[in-house]
Image: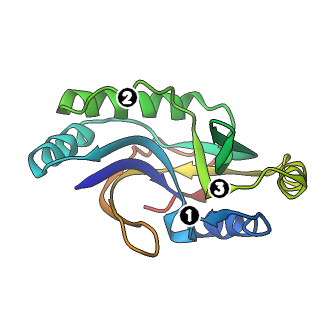
Amino acid sequence: MRLFIALGLPEDVRERLQFLAGGLPGARWVPPENLHLTLRFLGDVDHGLARDIDDALHSIDFPRFGLTLTGIGVFTEGKRINTLWVGVENNPELERLQAKVDQASVRAGVKPDRRKFKPHVTLARGRIEHGPKLERFLMEHSLFRLGPITVDAFNLYSSHLQSGGPLYVREVIYPLEYTGPSETDDATTSER
């Protein structure tokens, strides 16, 4: 089973992100139902390890918090652009939650992840062409900002590769603690 741990996004946030889709040669846009913010990629795991991961994630005690999506960027592989993403405003709570998720995964038996956590929501993958269209897209959306979004849970997803692209299935929801009214309670609530 191929697994990852992520924050789901509310429907209205996914709809707003879909307004960004289009106009870039070589970009394969992520369908709105697959938009998420990965906390930890686990890869292929057997059912025993999956149960251990689930137990470890259930032990995480963490309060709800808000986050803001901001800015557009790309990841490259060599000279090739392979990912277009929207970033996350600096957020200590998100960093702490990700660290707890990572530690729980390692305690359950997953190998440590050597990559530095770079919070983002992937908008498109593929062989995105360098050139004026990409430069214009990045410039037009450089001030993109959406939030605050209330994070009230994180999720364990399975990924199933299909001919039309991956299908992500939410396997388990891990609610975060409600600690009382806060400035983000009127904000958009994350999809469980």
Q: Residue at x 61, y 32 (%)?
A: 91
* Residue closest to the eye, 95 or 110: 110
Q: Report the mark closest to the observer, 1 or 3.
A: 3
The mark found on residue 113 in the picture is: 2
Secondary element at image label 3: strand
Image quadrant for the N terminus?
bottom left
Secondary element at image label 2: loop
Residue 166 percent across, percent down from the top left: 42, 66
Residue 105 to residue 188: above or below: above
Q: Residue at x 36, y 65 (%)?
A: 161
Q: Residues within 10 Å of mark 1 (few under 14, many from 20)?
A: some
Cα–Cα gap, marks 1 and 3? 28 Å
User: Which residue position holds label 1?
Assistant: 10
| Quadrant assignment, res 173 | bottom left
Disc with the residue nearer the chain's start (1 vs 3): 1
User: Which residue position holds label 3?
Assistant: 127
Residue 32 percent across, percent down from the top left: 57, 69
Residue 63 percent across, percent down from the top left: 44, 38
Residue 102 percent across, percent down from the top left: 35, 31
Answer yes or no: do the residues labelled 2 and 1 have beta carbons within 8 Å? no
Q: Residue at x 79, y 50 (%)?
A: 130
